[in-house]
Amino acid sequence: MLKKIFSILFVFSLIAVSPIQAAEFPTKEVQIIIPWAAGGATDLIFRALAATTDKFLGKAVIVVNRPGGAGAVGYTECMQAKPDGYTLVSAITPLTILPHQVKTAFTYKNFDPVINVVSDPGMFLVRSDAPWKSLKEFLDYAKKNPDMITVGNSGAGGGVHLIALAFEKTAGVKFNHIPFAGGGPSVTALLGGHINAVSVSPPEGIEHVKAGKLKIIALFAEKRFELFPDVPTVKEQGIDFVMGQWRGLASPKGTPPDVIKKLHDAFKQGIDDPVFKKNAKDMVVNLSYLGPEAFGKLMAHDDEFYGKLVKEIKK
Amino acid sequence: MFESLQHLINGFGIAGTVQNLFYCLIGCIVGTIIGVLPGIGPIAGIALLIPATFGLNPTSAIIMLAGIYYGAMYGGSTTSILLNVPGETASVITCIDGYQMAQKGRAGPALAIVAIGSFIAGTIGIFGLVFLAPPLAEAALAFGPPEYFSLMVFGFIVLSNVTGKSLLKSLMMAIIGLIIGTIGIDPVTGNARFTFGSVSLLGGIEFVAVAIGLFGIGEVLVNVNQPSEMLDQKVLMPRLRELYPSLQDLKKSIGAILRGAVSGFGIGLVPGPAPVIATYASYMIERKVSKHPEEFGKGAIEGVAGPESANNSACQAAFIPLFVLGIPFAPPTAILLGALLIHGVNPGPLMISQHAGLFWGVVASMYIGNFMLLILNLPFVPLFANILRVPKRILLPLVILFCITGMYTVNNFVFDIWMMLLFGAMGFLMRKWAYEGAPLLLALVLGPKLEVAFRQSLMISHGDFEVFINRPISMVFLLATVIFLIGPVIWLIFKKSKKGGD
């Protein structure tokens, strides 16, 4: 009997160590592909995270930018990489939007979720001297004047554009959506009074809210901002609408689960590192940790949601 | 005014510490190197060095990163002049007369005048930044989509015939540039346009690939096409005394430098690829005011001095919207914005008061940095000029290698290299049939912006075209465009009728 137990344990121990690669992982540096240009919010967050994760992983984490094709170039490259955990990609909301808009070689299903790092709520900003004092006044005006309130976004079909579309559907109003090349230009146009409102996610526009030039008219978060405790969420005001953009990490489909676990554990420690926490706070991004399973569910949910939404716009 | 001066003096105290001087120097050196290398530009350079600044205090970090940006404006012209390869996008125009000067053995004066002009323009730009920043930033906000559209139309019509040769050929090239500019994701509907199902084309055609291809690779191919004896020929080498500009060169250039500095600063405040437009505008101005416009395109020193000064002051001006509004108007300042954020500094309307030390320290460091760059660059003139001693047989393959590696560093994307080679072949044919590359590049830069502004304006106005003439700033630009187009015709008729009357 004892012999039998021992032999079973022996077999198990063999199985446990059999993926030698995993036991030794990582033997070389891990690379994160950012499908956007250097200097954007996604790039900055993962560069900061890479800097604090190095020591927990035991090997360097290198950030490489592969911009182009609205993210398609970087995602395609990661998808084609060996699923050994040495090539990761920053999985952010557009990964679940782009495949519905243009023909791409990938969907979110071509990637294994590793960890979610950040989740920023969407919000609408208006000028402080705008005629609307509250969300109610804003929506009442929109109801009476359909298609008249101009709402800027950071790019057609991008995250904040779709958030604005989803919000107008929920609230039963119609805005006039104006696309800009990024959050900066759309906020500038609002400051100059060329549009009425803008759909953004932090840190875009936050400084102008602090300075009193702009105000948050609608906040699509679960709870209020620490920075602006007086601004209620739309949910508090009776509109059940919570939406934002997430930023996490994924690896090519087929990465061994124990490798993902190792990566997850190291990045989790990196997120909890006080240095990273301070960096994130300075950048006004909202840390929102999710493990592989929960992150995968989030991606699946949003993919379905955006798929429907994009189809409706295209009609 | 005096308050600003007092702040600036405090800023010099901050920038003058040994640590900050050191980082300023590093930034300037890296910037110069990045500028000299074709392909890799200030954007990539700053992005690569951001992680290296994590351990620094914010002021030192921004001093170094800003140094890379304006340092690149000094170095960018080196390869334009020597090899006809634009080192970065704001040095495309310098290829025209700079390269001709080098072919005539005057590479030295061309390189030196760039350093001197950049220094003077940089200084003027910094003073503009110190005294005019807040009001100018507010003024920039008056530009909405309709104003922007009209400004782009004005720039497009006025600048596309920048070299003043055949207007018809220039417009043909500009239209090709506009067409190339439509490739990629439609900015309004998000649909893919003219990508033929290729993922690589979704992001559009990389400007750098077109610029290096048309100028650099095209020039190499033109050389290769010559009889082989020509390849052993060296470029006329100057004597040592002629390495630096003569008094006459300086006299000719000073007006160009000052005009370039002022116009560049103004254009630098406008959102978009200001340094590129500033160089075109300056070249155009110089050709118009020159008493001998026929020298342009054949090695006129003003055609180098003006644009190279303009891109420097435009680059200083680009800091104003960044620091005052927290909004980057130009791509390199977008990277700097990221760097500021990561150091816990949120640029915006409150920045100058909340982070006075950082703001004035960085401004003061720019002045010190410009001086360092002048000192750094002048001694290199003979060294760089000597590159032309290398026989073409050896130099040309090296240029190709240089272009390919440079192109790869922009996006780490092999597809861009193929694009560059394709445009190289096109550049060769264009040269053979005397078509100019400059209007094509200008259209490629302005076209997409023009389209977006046009469609945004009409979306805001619900399809009403009056939006362009109802708004005063927009109307002024459109009117100026009309005057520019029909003015010469009317003038001609007027002159003729006068003659007829005699």
Image (spheres, coloured by chain):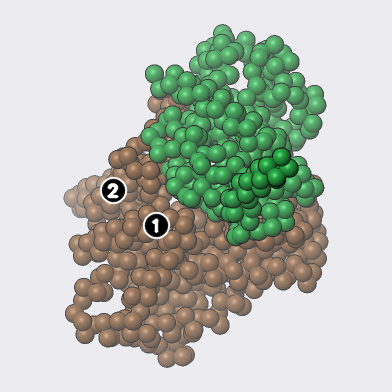
State the hue of chain B. brown
What amino acid is labelled 1 in the image?
Val
Residue at 78% x, 33% y is A227
User: Which quarter of the picture shows residue B110?
Assistant: bottom left
Mark 1 and mark 2 on one chain: yes
Q: Position of residue B330 (x, y in %)?
A: 54, 50
Residue highlighted by disc 2 = B176
Quarter of the image containing the N terminus of chain B?
bottom right
Where disc 2 sits, the SS reads: helix
- Label 1, residues with CA under 10 Å away: few <14, some 14-19, many ≥20: some
Tell me which chain the residue with mark 1 is part of.
B
| Mark 1 / mark 2, whichever is N-terminal | 2
Name the side, left or right, on which A307 lies relative to B223. Answer: right
Residue at 59% x, 54% y is A20
Residue highlighted by disc 1 = B414
Which one is nearer the viewer's eye here, B97 or B77?
A: B77
Depicted A220 relative to depicted B19: above or below: above
Residue at 47% x, 80% y is B384
Depicted A222 relative to depicted A263: above or below: above
Give the chain letter for green.
Answer: A
User: Which quarter of the picture shows residue A5?
Assistant: top right
Tell me which chain the residue with mark 2 is part of.
B
* Count of labels in the image: 2
Residue at 59% x, 13% y is A171
Where disc 1 sits, the SS reads: helix
Q: Does residue B483 show up?
A: no
